[in-house]
Amino acid sequence: CNLTGWWENDLGSRMLVSMADSQGNFSGEYHTAVSSAQKPIKPSPLVGSQHLDEDGQCTFGFTVNWKKFSDSTAVFVGQCFSTDSEEEVLQTSWLLREKVDSLSSDWKATR
């Protein structure tokens, strides 16, 4: 699987992934279509790594820093699959950590 290029999810969020280096490290930008932030949404930097495998169905992970409009950070992990029609599909799971004001509010900070 070649992660390089534009990807779009079911909610309309898009990400641009740069070419991975020989170690599988990559960077890019995430353009989210959903946010609970009060500020206007802006593209956010992402950095990640993929496990380069011979069968082409790599696993990967990346972090998005929403610093341009929110006090939160998200991490995504996933795997790339090739469908019978040779389309590449990314299946991911994510965690989002929002800043909270106190330790007692920690319970509601991670989604």
Image (cartoon, rainbow, N blue to C red):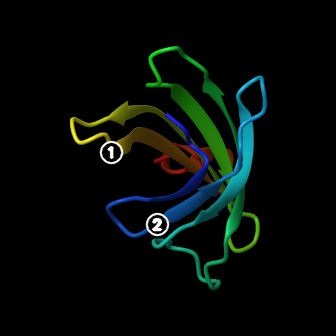
Where residue 60 sits, quadrant-wise, is top right
Quarter residue 91 falls in = top left
Q: Position of residue 17 (x, y in %)?
A: 64, 51
Kind of residue at disc 2? Ser
Q: Residues within 10 Å of mark 2 (few under 14, many from 20)?
A: few
Q: At label 1, which amino acid type do we have? A: Glu
- The structure residue drawn at horizontal position 72% and vertical position 37%, both measured from the top left corner, is 20
Task: Report the mark closest to the observer, 1 or 2.
Answer: 1
Q: Which residue position is annotated with label 2?
A: 13
**Which residue shows up at 23% across the image and 42% down it?**
85
Residue 82 relative to residue 30: left or right: left
Residue 69 lies, with reference to residue 84, above or below; the image says below
Which label number is shown at residue 74?
Answer: none
Question: What is the x, y in percent for residue 67?
Answer: 76, 64
The residues tagged by marks 1 and 2 sit, at their Cα atoms, a distance apart of: 19 Å
Asked if residue 19 shows in the view, the reply is yes
Mark 1 Cα-neighbour bin, 10 Å: few <14, some 14–19, many ≥20 = few
User: Is 99 positioned to the left or the right of 12 in the image?
Assistant: right
User: Which residue is the extreme one toward the front?
Assistant: 85
Identify the secondary structure beneath mark 1.
loop
**Mark positioned earlier in the residue sequence (1 or 2):** 2
Residue 98 placement, left or right of 101? left
Give me the disc on residue 87: 1
Most distant residue in the top direction = 54
Q: Position of residue 26 (x, y in %)?
A: 73, 40
Kindly identify the residue that appears in the image at 38 percent across and 42 percent down: 88
Name the foreground residue: 28 vs 97: 28
Q: How many marks?
A: 2
Given residues 31 and 34, the one toward you in this image is 31
